[in-house]
Amino acid sequence: MKDRVIGAILVVAYALLLLKSQGLIYFILVLTLGLEIIGELLEITGLSEHRLIPYTVFSLSAVLFYNMHTKVFLIPMILLSLFFYFIVMEKKEPERFFPFSLFFIYVFIGIASITLFNKKLLLLLVSIVWAVDTLAYFTGMFFGKHKLAPSLSPKKTVEGAIGGSIGGTIVATFVAVKLNIVYPEIKTFIFIFFLTVVSQIGDLLESYIKRIFGVKDSGNIIPGHGGVFDRLDSSIAVAPFLLLLLPNSSLLF
């Protein structure tokens, strides 16, 4: 319990630091999270001896993406990164390298998207993920009877997922309207409901790669809470959609 409390304090402190920072400092803080997740993926897949190239490719791609201030160049950068990977990295274990590469792209897209968020979008992202996780947990605890994905996450239930999405939609819509990000329209509810579903899919995706390689937690950097990927799995999944589909794009940097 003591470790979990300490870990929670560290997570909240870092989140507040993100909300207070801006510009280059904000970018560095987000990039640091991304690099830690890449390191955790390397450990999970048994490729930890290949840290230099993934770190370099991830950092350079993120810097270029951030400086361009546009999503147009995202796909070319990802393709170039992949090409660089296949040329340089050893491919003795494709069963490990292939899933790592897919999740590398997945994490890069999420982290790169978050680097373009302002405080309002960051608050909305946090509110979506927090509301879905919290309400799914309590709904599942009291009403859960049917397993959602027992092979990936035995404790998750269909009822919990439904409660998380419905409750998360209500909470996140309220936050979005209060922050003047969107108007209280039907399309807003539909959009945010979609994001709550994506949030839960992101959680399951992380569980999937951990299940493949027989790992319980993505890391142990956060006392009592596992790794950074364990905490940001849903945020990484939601961020690109929030960035691309948000009706009011004027809020972006």
Image (cartoon, rainbow, N blue to C red):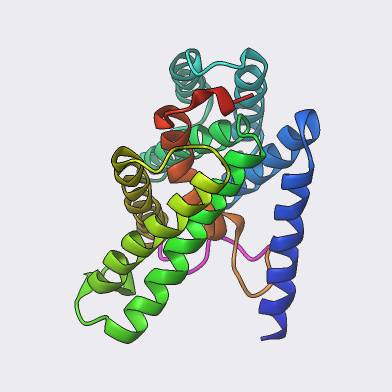
Expressed as whole percent of the image width and height from the top left, the position of residue 75 reads 43, 18
The answer to if 236 sits in the magenta stretch is no
Q: Position of residue 119 (x, y in %)?
A: 66, 40
Residue in the image at 45% along x and 59% along y: 171
Q: Which of the two residues, 31 or 19, is positioned nearer the viewer here? A: 19
* On screen, residue 25 above or below 171: above
Quadrant (top left/top right/bottom left/bottom right) for the C terminus: top right
Residue at horizontal 58%, vertical 36%? 114
Magenta stretch bounds:
212-221
Instruction: Decide if residue 77 is in sight here.
Output: yes
**In the displayed structure, would residue 141 be above or below residue 152?**
below
The main secondary structure of the magenta stretch is: loop
Q: Quadrant of residue 15?
A: bottom right
Find the residue positioned furthest to the left: 146
Q: In the picture, which quadrant includes the N terminus?
A: bottom right
Residue 213 magenta-highlighted: yes
41 horizontally vs 75: left or right: right
Residue in front for this viewpoint, 53 or 93: 53
